[in-house]
């Protein structure tokens, strides 16, 4: 799978705009509002900050990220430092320096847990991992990390402006992880390693119930249980498949496995009394 797009262009522009508007508002403040003694620094804080903004707006995100870090390094206790931390995380993301973006955003969360920009920091961590999701034939660590960040954002800030997009991406990440489990399960099934296959298919049914892979997982469970001679479990898996996905081709295949006949017109024939949880 190629790296999915982070978000639609309108939403992306809105998110970027929100940061830049806040940043520019702060950037317009006079240096006279700063109370600390700046005599030890090499350059004025407002000059450093505005140069970082200029670099970001001019399409030099990596340079901007380093410049925002310099704001914090030279003026760590100023009101500019907090905003510069968040802006550096965003600039690293724009530069595709995802590990740096995640580190900067996490540091922002750790240092400023009550800041209004914390939801965005979680979102930025999530999309930084999300951009690195690989096809299901490869390791899915990034998919899991993205899902964890999105779930944390939704759990802690359900009313955030980022929660809806995070939810959509979390669903896609779950479907991707379920696809990986199915790939491994199919391999075990092809090698007659039925117990190992069953564990993978059960994982899909139990952990990824809302994904598109559940009907096939239930069918494969039916197939694997029959191969082991555990007919009751096979019948139960097929029953749940028929109850929840009666129009699925996977249900038709499971019915044929169990009976050797055509799919019935009614759903209340051989399934009576067997509906319920699989496990």
Image: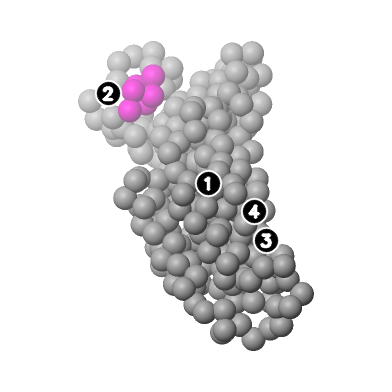
In the picture of the structure, the residue carrying the numbered disc 4 is: 66
Which mark is first along the chain, 2 or 1? 1
Q: Main secondary structure of the magenta part?
A: helix
In three-dimensional space, the C-alpha distance between marks 1 and 3, rounded to whole angstroms, equals: 15 Å
In the picture of the structure, the residue carrying the numbered disc 3 is: 70
In three-dimensional space, the C-alpha distance between marks 1 and 2, rounded to whole angstroms, equals: 64 Å
Which mark is first along the chain, 3 or 2? 3
In the picture of the structure, the residue carrying the numbered disc 1 is: 60
Instruction: Please state which of the two labelled residues, at mark 4 or mark 2, is closer to the viewer.
Output: 4
Give x and y (percent) for residue 140. Answer: 61, 35
| Left or right placement of residue 38 versus residue 13 in this view | right
| Left or right placement of residue 127 versus residue 192 in this view | left
Instruction: Locate the C terminus by quadrant.
Output: top right
> What count of labels does the image hold?
4
Can you tell which mark lies on residue 264? 2
In three-dimensional space, the C-alpha distance between marks 1 and 4, rounded to whole angstroms, equals: 10 Å
């Amino acid at each position: 799978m190629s790296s999915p797009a982070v978000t639609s262009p309108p939403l992306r522009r809105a998110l970027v705009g929100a940061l830049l508007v806040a940043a520019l508002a702060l950037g317009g403040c006079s240096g006279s509002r700063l109370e600390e003694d700046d005599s030890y620094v090499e350059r004025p804080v407002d000059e450093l900050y505005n140069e970082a903004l200029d670099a970001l707006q001019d399409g030099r995100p990596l340079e901007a990220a380093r410049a925002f870090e310099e704001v914090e390094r030279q003026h760590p206790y100023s009101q500019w430092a907090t905003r510069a931390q968040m802006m550096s995380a965003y600039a690293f993301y724009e530069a595709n320096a995802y590990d740096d973006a995640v580190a900067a955003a996490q540091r922002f969360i750790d240092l400023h847990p009550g800041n209004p920009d914390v939801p965005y920091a979680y979102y930025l961590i999530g999309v930084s991992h999300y951009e690195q999701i690989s096809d299901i034939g490869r390791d899915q660590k990034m998919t899991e990390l993205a899902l964890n960040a999105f779930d944390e954002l939704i759990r802690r800030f359900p009313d955030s402006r980022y929660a809806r997009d995070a939810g959509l991406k979390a669903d896609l990440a779950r479907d991707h992880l379920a696809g990986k489990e199915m790939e491994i399960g199919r391999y075990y099934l092809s090698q007659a390693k039925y117990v190992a296959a069953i564990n993978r298919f059960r994982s899909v049914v139990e952990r990824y119930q809302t994904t598109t892979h559940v009907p096939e997982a239930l069918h494969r469970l039916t197939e694997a249980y029959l191969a082991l001679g555990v007919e009751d479990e096979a019948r139960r898996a097929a029953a749940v498949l028929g109850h929840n996905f009666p129009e699925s081709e996977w249900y038709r295949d499971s019915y044929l496995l169990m009976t050797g006949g055509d799919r019935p017109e009614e759903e209340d024939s051989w399934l009576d009394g067997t509906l319920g949880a699989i496990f």
